[in-house]
Image: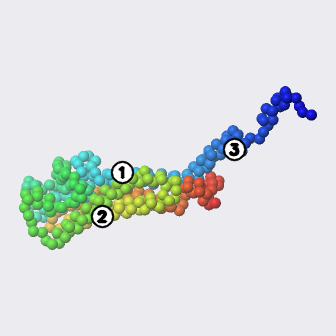
Amino acid sequence: MGLPSALRSRMRPSTEKNDPPSPSSPSPQNSATQQPAEASDNVSFKRATRMRKGFALSASVAYLLSWIFLVLVLIGNTYNRPVLSSIYFFKLNLADIIPTSVPNASLINSIAQSIGLHDFYQVGLWSFCEGYLHEGITFCSRPQTLYWFNPVEILMNELLAGATIALPTEVITILSVLRIASQIMFGFFLTGAVLGFLLIFLSPMAVWSRWWSLPLAVVAFLEMMIVLAASVVGTAISVAFKYAAEAQSELNIHVEIGVKMFVFMWLATGFSLWAFAVHSGMGCCCTSRRDLKTGRRVVRDGRGVRA
């Protein structure tokens, strides 16, 4: 016994409403719960990788500071400016080159100054500056790539008006070593500044994966060694020049080491060393985002631990 057709048409929509939802079409309730779950995962990832982000940020800041100090080393003593003129490797003081024990020493010193000898010569990475004690710097040479300070050539050009002097073999050898060391130092400081500038922006990439830590650590090691070698060479040249110049007892020559230049280049070296240590440590420590996504580590108590 069938139902009337009017009743069957009224009951059909109600039965369709009670049908279970199709598995292929997610319900609005499931999509609503899925979004908070994804947001919770992102928050957990951020908490678990917080330490790695902090170390990567510290490396970027260290490279920024190292680059600033390297720039100061590069532009020091290039022009007669209040700040630049005080940044130099060493300062050669010839104001009283003839000792007072020599008869008529003051007269001889004044004659030497009148024919072209300046009171002091200070050396930077690109050029040298000269001047008098009562006037300050009067001239800075034009910045030159792979510059090296040749005191014999400068004195011959200024004091002797281009005359030539037969130099002993020992002096020629010392000048050759000084030229090679100065050019190596120049190239290392310039290369270190370029690599440090690039690493400022590349360091945060170590947050995403440990695989990025390996090439970054290699580049960081290269940058650190270049800056360290340049600082060692610069220190050795300045100290050796001071010792060699002041060892001449028959001449009253004084050499002043540039304190600012030394502080800047060794601070740059220290910051580069810290950044390299950070990149080396992130290769085996601190959870990365890739560790969490691949399941190598899981979030537990806000930290990434091994699965």
Q: Which of marks 2 and 3 is in front?
A: 3
Residue 205 at what x, y percent from top left? 48, 53
- The mark closer to the camera, 1 or 3, is 3
Residue 2, compared with residue 64, is above or below; it is above
| Secondary structure state at the residue bearing disc 1 | helix
Q: Which amino acid does label 3 sit on?
A: Ser
As shown in the figure, which amino acid type bears the numbered disc 1? Ile
Q: In this view, does 175 lie to the left or right of 43?
A: left
Where disc 2 sits, the SS reads: helix
User: Left or right: where does residue 192 sit relative to residue 43?
Assistant: left
Q: Specify few, some or many for label 3: CA neighbours under 10 Å numbering under 14, 14-19, or 20 or more.
A: few
Q: Earlier in the sequence, mark 2 or mark 3?
A: 3
Residue at image position (35%, 54%) is 194
Q: In which quarter of the image is residue 109?
A: bottom left
- Looking at the image, which is closer to me, 253 or 86? 86
Q: Is residue 44 left or right of residue 236?
A: right
Question: In this figure, which residue is indicated by the disc labeled 2?
Answer: 233
At 38% from the left edge and 52% from the top edge, which residue is drawn?
A: 197
Q: Mark 1 and 3 residues: CB-CB less than 8 Å, in contact?
A: no
| Viewer-side residue, 201 vs 125 | 201
For image coordinates 84% across by 31% down, the residue present is 8
In this figure, which residue is indicated by the disc labeled 3?
Answer: 24
Q: Position of residue 122 (x, y in %)?
A: 22, 56
- The answer to whether residue 3 is left or right of residue 292 is right
- Residue at point 57%, 49% (across, down): 46
Give the quarter of the figure containing the N terminus.
Answer: top right
User: What residue does disc 1 label?
Assistant: 68
Instruction: Give the spatial CA distance, label 2 vs label 3.
Output: 71 Å
Labels 1 and 2: the sequence-earlier one = 1
The quarter holding residue 16 reads: top right
Mark 1 vs mark 2, CA separation in Å = 20 Å
The amino acid beneath tag 2 is Val
